Amino acid sequence: MTREDMLARLIVQASAGAGDLVTMRAIVEEASELGASRALDRLGLGDTEAQDDIDELRELLSAWRDAKKGAWKAAVEWLVRGLLALLLIGIAVRLGVAETLS
């Protein structure tokens, strides 16, 4: 029996006057499961390989975050090195090292 059939039978049972709390909870549970299943199918994650796809996406996202963090770190390091080089050149010019080398 499919989820749709189960939900239809529960709704018929509830409308026939046997709508006690257990039946209502079963209707809500079946409707929720059916809705979640449909949502996953629409996202393309309703098959048996969906967990592998999600795991792979998480690995890719983690690698992207690591690469982004590494790129920012490298950019800051190069910026600091450039500023230090400019500072050294400025000190050398101020001390007249260029004239001494000539």
Image (cartoon, rainbow, N blue to C red):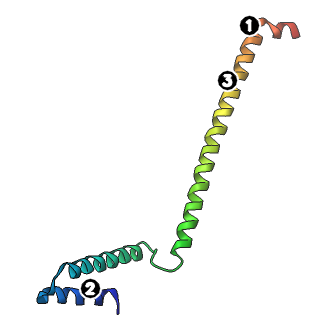
Q: Is residue 90 above or below residue 78?
A: above
Find numbered disc 2 in the image and state the secondary structure of the residue it sits on: helix
Q: Which of 7 and 101 is in front in this view?
A: 7
Q: Is residue 23 visible?
A: yes
Q: What residue do we see at 55% from left, 61% from top?
A: 58
Earlier residue among tags 2 and 3: 2
Residue 94 circle label:
1
Secondary element at tag 3: helix
Instruction: Depth check: give the residue in front, 1 or 14.
Output: 14
Q: Determine the residue positioned at 12% across, 90% down.
A: 16
In the picture, measured across the screen, residue 16 lies left or right of residue 102, that is left
Q: Which mark is in front, 3 or 1?
A: 3
Quarter-of-image position of residue 37: bottom left
Q: Position of residue 27 (x, y in %)?
A: 24, 80
User: Dot 2 corresponds to which residue?
Assistant: 7
Give the labeled residue for mark 3.
Answer: 83
Q: Earlier in the sequence, mark 1 or mark 2?
A: 2
Mark 1, secondary structure of its residue: helix
The image position of residue 14, as x and y in percent, is 16, 85
Image quarter hosting the N terminus: bottom left
Question: Residue, x 54% and y 70% (percent of image)?
Answer: 53
**CB-based contact (under 8 Å), mark 1 and mark 2:** no
The answer to whether residue 102 shows anywhere in this view is no
